[in-house]
Structure formats: C-alpha cells, structure tokens
Image: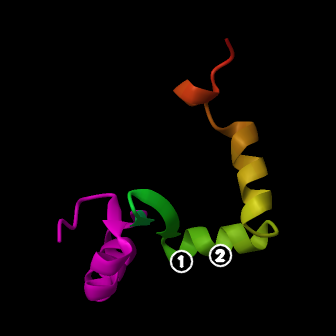
Amino acid sequence: MDKSATDHAIAEARANLSDLLAAVRLLSVVRFLTSRGKRQAALVPVELGELVEAVGGPERAVEILRQHAPAAPDDAPQ
C-alpha cells in the first residue's frame, strides 16, 4: 500500500485500515476510499469531522466551503 496515495480501493483499505487511520491521524491528511475508481467516502482527521458536525453536518459544510473556496477549474464561470 502506498501511504502517500490519496485514493485507496475499499478492499485495499480494509486490509490496511490501521495504516490508513494512522496516516490520517498523524499526518493530518485526507484519504479517499474508492470503488471501481470512483470516490465513495473519505477518512478525515477527527478535528475536521468535528467541525463538519458542529456546522450541521456534511451538506452544510459543503455549502459553507463552496462559498469560501476558490473556484475549481470545472466550476469556473465560462
């Protein structure tokens, strides 16, 4: 398992869960779990998870972040 990779297949993650969790916790990084190459879920540092919870959950956190984050190339106005 490549600990520096961002995306990890769910089956691979299951086999290496303790290593993935240690990387997320110790390095404060996000790791995505994929199925057939598509992101399905994310492992995030506890501080981020608690902030998401504090603002009302994932949907509200996405609203807040979209208002303050720079436009991604796909989101740029044309």
Q: Residue furthest left?
A: 1
Q: Quadrant of residue 59?
A: bottom right
Q: Quadrant of the N terminus?
A: bottom left
Whether residue 18 is visible to the viewer of this picture, yes or no, is yes
For the point 32% across and 79% down, the residue is 11
For the point 42% across and 67% down, the residue is 35
Residue 8 tag number: none
Residue corresponding to mark 1 = 46
Image: magenta residue range: 1-30
Image: 49 above or below 72: below
Q: Are marks 2 and 1 in contact (CB under 8 Å)?
A: yes
Expressed as whole percent of the image width and height from the top left, the position of residue 68 reads: 70, 38
Whether residue 71 is visible to the viewer of this picture, yes or no, is no
Residue type pointed to by label 1? Val
Residue type pointed to by label 2? Glu
Q: Quadrant of residue 32?
A: bottom left
